[in-house]
Image (cartoon, rainbow, N blue to C red):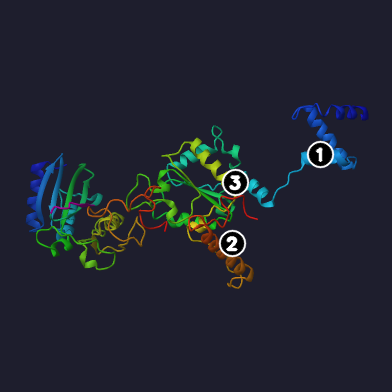
Amino acid sequence: MPDAPGLELIAGELREAHPGSVLGTYHEHGQACLIVDPAQVREVLLWLKNTPGQEYNFLASLHGVDYLPAEPRFGVHYELLNRERVERIRVRAAVPDPQQSRTSPDGSGREAEQPAGSDSDELPRVPSVVDIFPTAEFQEREVYDFFGIVFEGHPDLRRILLPEVYVGWPQRRDFPIGGEEVIFTYNERAVPGWTQ
Amino acid sequence: MEVKREKLRALSPLAEPGSPEHLRIRQLRARDLLRGDLTDEQLEEHVQQSVFLGRLEDVLNWARSNSMFPMTFGLACCAIEMISLVGSRYDIARFGAEAMRASPRQADFIILSGRVSIKMAPVVRRLYDQMLEPRWAISMGACSSSGGMFSNYAVVQGADKFMPIDVHIPGCPPRPEAFFYGFNKLQRMIQNNPDQGWRRRYNAVGTEEWARDDVITGQPSEASQAAYARTRQAIAEAAEATGPEGADPYGTTGAGTT
């Protein structure tokens, strides 16, 4: 695990190798994290994987996060591991929400949930890293499944856990909790729907 | 031997029902009946004591309800409780339902033991459709009855959204005693009338096996068309007579159909 100065060294070297790639760093709870531009996430991961002295060549986990109402809204986390030194580093691609940028500037009015397949331009996009880390294939599908983040260049980007006909991205924070009101005897007539 | 029989016959008014003497008397009377020795009053008495009259339907339902084959089908944690039903401590064999069937085509009823996810719902429905009529379904526990604690994107809020359920058993999970209470309710329902009225409730009148299309031609047979018309007419008449809530064309609350 690189300590805070070690993390800054890595960030500095990355900024030299790929200008504009590292947006920020943080080191807390003993965990080091690089916040990177999603457009350059492939370059960053390749650099961390192949540069002598770094060699974080194992992708332990890839997952998505919804930081609503923060900006940029989404995060795709790449947990990298160097197995010889047993050092871990987290790369977080800060992914903005295309729908958010399109709505009112105060950010109060959020768009309704887009039906699947309606307009994939409205979904956030991140380059896929499957050719760098083959293990990312299913994990990117899972992130797509639950957060609606499109991984460009993924060989087979389909839903993986939810039914293929499912509409919506259920792990987003603005996805409604619970489907519907539970029907008991006392509200059976008041709740419209299936008994009628 | 003759003497002993006469002696037993003489004893018969005094013999308590259920006593060994009583049983022996009935055995001997049955033998006399087969020989043709019983006449008049004795014959009448014997017939009254040993012959039950009933409709074939009632007898059939009595047999059905006491020989139920559940399907081997576990969905979630309630399935663990369902497994314990079959063990010797609770022993569902007491009620004649211990023979778990591995195929829906051999099963009489299905126990939905756990939450039904939206991805599993088509599978459950398909299994239910593969079961032969008459068939029943028990929703075991809160999750399959109403969604339970899983009020989220992945779980169906109540299995009767996609299939008819005969008995809902509350609990998380239900204790085996609770399950047996529900199962006995189901048995009573079957003995009373196998049709629980769900066809009317789910507006599924006309999907009975006798009302379905002819398998070969794909056209409704004349008999099924006539039966369908009769059913519709009976529902309409009942609704006219007692209002929509009181319509009971299947006689679920009455003495039964004829």
**Element carrying mark 3:** loop
Asked if the magenta segment contains residue A69, the reply would be yes
Q: x%, y% of residue B19?
A: 76, 27
Q: Which residues are magenta?
A: A64-70
Say which amino acid is labelled 1: His
As displayed, is residue A112 above or below residue B58? below
Please tell me which residue is depicted at 43% across the width and 39% down the height of the picture.
B173
- Label 1, residues with CA under 10 Å away: few <14, some 14-19, many ≥20: some
Which of disc 1 and disc 2 is earlier in sequence?
A: 1
Q: CA distance from mark 1 to mark 3?
A: 33 Å
Residue B68, labelled with which disc? Answer: 3
As displayed, is residue B242 above or below residue B82? below
What residue is shown with label 2? B209
Q: Is residue B62 visible?
A: yes
Which of disc 2 and disc 3 is earlier in sequence?
A: 3
Same subunit, tags 3 and 2:
yes
For the N terminus of chain B, the image quarter is top right
What residue is shown with label 1? B46
